[in-house]
Amino acid sequence: MFATALKRLSLVLIVVLAGCAGAGLRQDFGAVEAPTVAVGDRWVYQVINGYNKLPVGTITHEVLAVTPEYVEVKVTEDPGGSFTRRFGAGWNPYSGIMPPGLPPGFGFEKTLPSGARVDYAPAFPAFRFPLVPGQHWSSRITVTDPSLGRSLEADVDSRVIGLGQVTTPAGQFDAVKVRHDVYYRDWVWWRTQTWEWYFDWYAPAVNNIVLRDSQAQYRDYTRIIDKAPEIMRSDWRISHLVEFSRR
């Protein structure tokens, strides 16, 4: 019964997300300023498989330290474990993961492993506060797998889509929708570069995102479907806020 209820909740969430695709979002909102966080602030997200709409786990973020240079956060994944992650100004992370679930390649590789924990230099430009209607920013970052010592560059293009209301298990929020397109410069002779796109809904009421919807793909030139290179898709993950507390 509990699993059925979660599935229904997930389906409702997908409908809410679809409704926030861009139509009806406000473009007349005032500037949204950078968040102010404190040690002990905590956010819990449920992660949903976007393909079958089933829950796959939870992710908890808890602030451990705040300095003028960075915010240090304890990240706990269930299933999984705990680790720390640093963010620069405006929730811009210095580390992350490669899009998980992409099929393995073969031969000479420029790619970093699917799902690998990677470092960003400079920090990943997720937000440029204050957020204002029509805002757009682009930059290039270096993505490094510290375990392998391998790096590649990525081009990040982000834009503010608008302001709308989003409902999650933690409540209903006014949230700014931001789209990110990440183009990893990992192409090789047999495949295109990896293209990752995701949407963040940032809610000032919780000083963080309340929804994230992420996917990625590349095209495989060695696999032809209907006269076109086959699209190889990553995991599709939707994370929504289920609980938060602020100090």
Image (cartoon, rainbow, N blue to C red):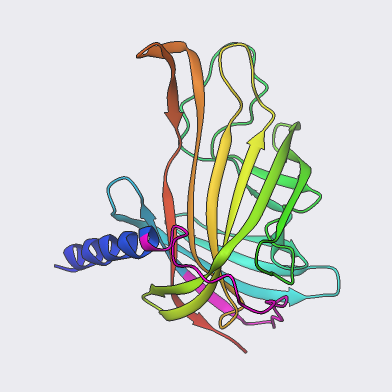
Q: Which residue is drawn at 37% across and 58% down?
A: 18
Residue sitting farthest toward the left: 1
Which quadrant: the N terminus? Answer: bottom left
- Image quadrant in which you'd find residue 224: top left
Name the residue at 67% across, 43% down: 118
Left or right of 29? Residue 38 is right
Q: In which quarter of the image is residue 161?
A: bottom right
* Left or right position of 120 against 101: right
Q: Which residue lies furthest to the right in this view?
A: 68
Asked whether the viewer can see residue 146, the reply is no
Q: Main secondary structure of the magenta part?
A: loop
Residue at (66, 79) in percent of width and height: 30
Q: In this view, does 23 lie above or below 117?
A: below
Residue 158 in the image: above or below residue 19: above
Residue 159 in sight in this render: yes
Task: Indicate whether 128 appears above or below 33.
Answer: above
**Which quadrant does the C terminus fall into?**
bottom right
Residue 66's spot in the image, x, y percent?
77, 76
Residue 28 in magenta?
Answer: yes
- Picture coordinates of residue 92 (x, y %)? 71, 60
Q: For the point 25% across and 65% down, which residue is it?
A: 6
User: 24 or 124, which lies in front?
Assistant: 24
Q: Is residue 87 magenta?
A: no
**Residue 25 spot, x, y in % from top left:** 49, 68
**Magenta segment boundaries in residue numbering:** 19-44
**Residue 210 on image: x %, y %:** 50, 70
Which is more toward the observer, 230 or 28?
28
In the shown orientation, is residue 180 left or right of residue 104? right
